[in-house]
Amino acid sequence: MFLGHSERVLAERAGLRETRRVPAFTPPEVRPLISAERIAARVDELAAQITRDYTGRSVVLLSVLKGSFVFAADLARAIDLPIRMEFLGVRSYGADTKSSGVVQITQDLTRPVTGDDLVIVEDIIDTGLTISYLKEQLRGRNPASVKVAALLHKPARIQREVEIDYLGFTIDDVFVVGYGLDYAERYRNLPYLGVLDPSQTGAK
Ligand code: IMP
Ligand code: MG
């Protein structure tokens, strides 16, 4: 059977997933919430939407570090367009599992984004404070457009309404780790998303 380019890419990617050795470690304090397979299927859907929306345009995927690095890597490879990648290092002050909304840029873009179509890639929109701040900052750099792709959204805790143009999953008010998300820099390499049991870590 003859496969087109994107079908071939999809088939290859499915094969890779089957053969890739997936770490099996499951820390006892993490309760699995969204499996690697469900994440992969959703990421492919979001990438297909982005591909449709941005055909013929100059897309820059802007990965907000550190939390979005896994999502951004998977999303980027599933988008069937020539894109550019930029990374923005951000630290949001606040102890433990709460965001303060005070954002410090720890690593800036390497190139100007004037006239580009920006897609900000975030791991999770919790209070919405971080993404609101970033959108405002980035608009000042005169891109042609700014949209937001977020893997997760916790509507229960929202303080600032933000439009999420490409959303993976809506979740309850729980603290999640894995697939790039951390608690005190741990768990980022879990291939799935899980709920961290605060009683096991001292998390609030
Ligand atoms: P916001 O400013 O409250 O929307 O927070 C956004 C940032 O807080 C995210 O980019 C994460 O780094 C962090 N965060 C919020 N909720 C969680 C969670 O459940 N797990 C891990 N990190 C989280
Ligand atoms: Mg983050």
Image (cartoon, rainbow, N blue to C red):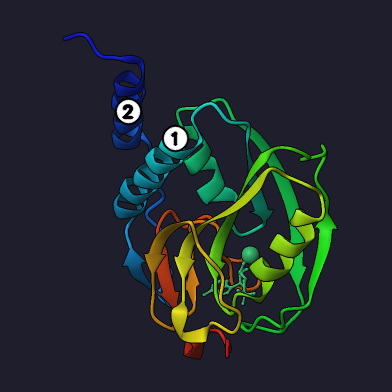
Camera-side residue: 142 or 32? 142
Residue with the most extreme top position: 2
**Residue position for label 1:** 51
Cα separation between marks 2 and 1: 14 Å
What kind of residue is marked 2? Leu
Q: Would you say residue 185 is visible in this rendering?
A: no
**Is 126 left or right of 86, judged from the image as shown?**
left
Camera-side residue: 114 or 150? 114
**Residue position for label 2:** 10
Q: Secondary structure at mark 1?
A: helix
Camera-side residue: 122 or 181? 122
**Is 154 left or right of 57, judged from the image as shown?**
left
* Residue at the spot 74% in from the left edge and 52% down from the top edge: 88
What kind of residue is marked 1? Thr
Residue 181, disc: none
Picture layout, residue 160 above or below residue 144: below
Numbered-mark total: 2
- Where in the figure is residue 146, as x and y percent of width and height? 63, 51
Q: Quadrant of the C terminus?
A: bottom right
Q: Secondary structure at mark 2?
A: helix
Query: Which of the marked residues, 2 or 1, is nearer the chain's N terminus?
Result: 2
The quadrant of the picture showing ligand 2 is bottom right
* Residue at the spot 47% in from the left edge and 57% down from the top edge: 190
Q: Would you say residue 118 is visible in this rendering?
A: yes
Q: Quadrant of the N terminus?
A: top left
Label pair 2/1, CB-CB below 8 angstroms:
no
Picture layout, residue 36 above or below residue 74: below
**Is 34 left or right of 112, judged from the image as shown?**
left
For label 1, count other residues whose C-alpha is less than 10 Å away and answer few (under 14), some (14-19) or many (20+): some
For label 2, count other residues whose C-alpha is less than 10 Å away and answer few (under 14), some (14-19) or many (20+): some
